[in-house]
Amino acid sequence: MKYLYLTLTFFISFHTLQAQRDFNKVQIKEEKVGEQLYMLTGSGGNMALLHGEDGVFLIDDQFAPLTEKILTKIKTLTGKDKVDFLVNTHWHGDHTGGNENMGKQGALIVAHENVRARMQRGRTKLEAGRAVKPAPKVALPVMTFEEGINLHLNGEDIMVFHVDIAHTDGDAIVYFPKSNVIHTGDTYFKERYPYIDINSGGHINGVLKTLERIIFLADGDTKIIPGHGSLSNKEELMAYRNVLMTCRDRIQKAIKAGKTLEEIQASDITKEWDESWGGGFINPTSFRKTLYTNLKEQD
Ligand SMILES: [Zn+2]
């Protein structure tokens, strides 16, 4: 027992140190996408920053240890030292980790009602691979919506809206019509297989429906900020949608033909993209399993 305890302690501290070291090395970088609008990257989900006379508006806030670096970058770009309005595209920790810090400084946090519900509840290890502690009150969104909400700030009529259960059951897309910029949250993982969080209510068909809506809103000049990956555009997003649709259709067909998950895993059903898109967090095996699970349910 003592040995196990020591091993666990070592394991935990090693990983904590590892994580801290990684965050120490992270740099927050900006890419200008509008007059007063930036895409910000560091470690975790891509952020967007809009500033102007009405204050600082931020989409997502990565991990808590990065708050100071994010605020330093915001200060450099805007001269302001806190965030006034914060939108979370969904509840995952690499998009909401800074909420507590920013909430304490008075940020008004806005998100889909399921983001608040899931953060408030947290999740146990039994429900998913990793347990998540319930978030403190100050980290929770105080303004929630079911379908959408508009914010009129800094000369933009910002549209924040939910399309369907997709990456999770609380995804928000954020559209800046004047700057012609769309932040997709994690409904779009550029050039890699998507993570569809089934334990948080995600579904491939909702991902496709959400991508359709974004394609409808975008034109050839729209700058698209994906949840993960570099700045994108309509053409790339359409190619992504087409690949996901092809994979969805093939797996659906295989299920209808009576194929088991094992047979689907052993086949070359997604082979064209397995090498280029399956090398990250979501490999071909987990991607196929997710689609199979989603689609089998409806069979
Ligand atoms: Zn996510």
Image: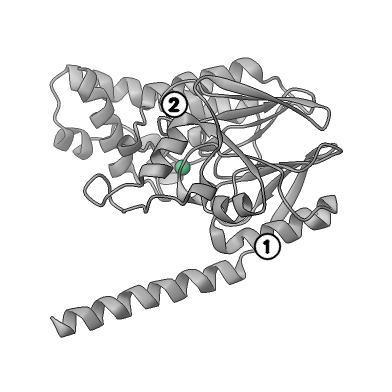
Q: Earlier in the sequence, mark 1 or mark 2?
A: 1
CA–CA distance in space, label 1 to label 2: 32 Å
Q: Tell me the kind of residue under disc 1.
A: Lys
Looking at the picture, tell me which residue is in the foreground, 253 or 31: 31
Q: Which mark is residue 61?
A: none
- For label 2, the crowd category at 10 Å Cα-Cα, with few meaning under 14, some 14 to 19 and many 20 or more, is many
Looking at the picture, tell me which residue is in the foreground, 163 or 224: 163
Q: Residue at x 60, y 49 (%)?
A: 103
Image location (x, y in percent) of residue 8: 26, 76
Please say if 208 is above or below 82: above
Mark 1 and ligand 1: say if the CB distance to the nearest ligand atom is below 8 Å: no
Q: Residue at x 75, y 47 (%)?
A: 31
Instruction: Check disc 2 and report the residue beneath it.
Output: 207
User: Quadrant of the rendered structure where residue 58 is?
Assistant: top right
Name the colouring of the figure.
one colour
Viewed as shown, does residue 32 lie left or right of 26? right
Instruction: Check disc 1 and report the residue beneath it.
Output: 69
